[in-house]
């Protein structure tokens, strides 16, 4: 588990060299949510109301952060999402 976390931070640090922080965080958080939901499905665990609420808060926060970043006209550097090309 610790190895996987260390590896994810290592790859995130390399991604931040080319991708803006907001986009990298959104992808990292999104992957975390998807992998967590998949682990619940694989191990046949039920998501309780608090787990669903917590996941929804994370998703909402990432979406709001990216909406406001796009409205502010944040510079993407060399990275341009396909949506904005």
Image: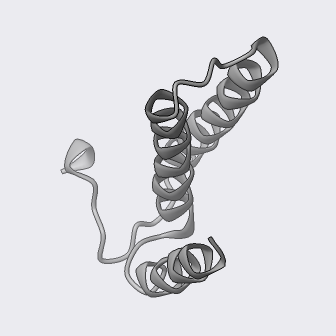
Q: Is residue 34 above or below residue 8?
A: above
Q: Residue at x 73, y 29 (%)?
A: 57
The x, y position of residue 50, in whole percent, is: 81, 20
Q: Is residue 58 above or below residue 76?
A: above
Of residues 49 and 67, the one drawn nearer to the viewer in this rendering: 49
Q: Is residue 9 above or below residue 44?
A: below
Image quadrant in which you'd find residue 42: top left
The x, y position of residue 32, in whole percent, is: 54, 50
Q: Residue at x 48, y 80 (%)?
A: 16
Q: Residue at x 44, y 87 (%)?
A: 14
Image quadrant in which you'd find residue 46: top right
- In what quadrant of the picture does the N terminus appear? bottom right
The x, y position of residue 76, in whole percent, is: 40, 67
Which residue extends farthest top?
49
Colour style of the rendered protein structure = one colour
Counting every numbered tag in the picture gives: 0
């Amino acid at each position: 588990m610790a190895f996987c976390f260390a590896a994810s931070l290592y790859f995130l640090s390399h991604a931040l060299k080319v991708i803006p922080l907001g986009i990298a965080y959104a992808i990292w958080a999104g992957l975390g949510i998807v992998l967590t939901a998949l682990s619940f499905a694989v191990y046949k665990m039920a998501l309780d109301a608090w787990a669903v609420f917590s996941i929804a808060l994370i998703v909402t926060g990432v979406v709001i952060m990216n909406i406001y970043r796009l409205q502010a006209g944040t510079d993407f550097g060399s990275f341009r999402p396909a949506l904005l090309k």
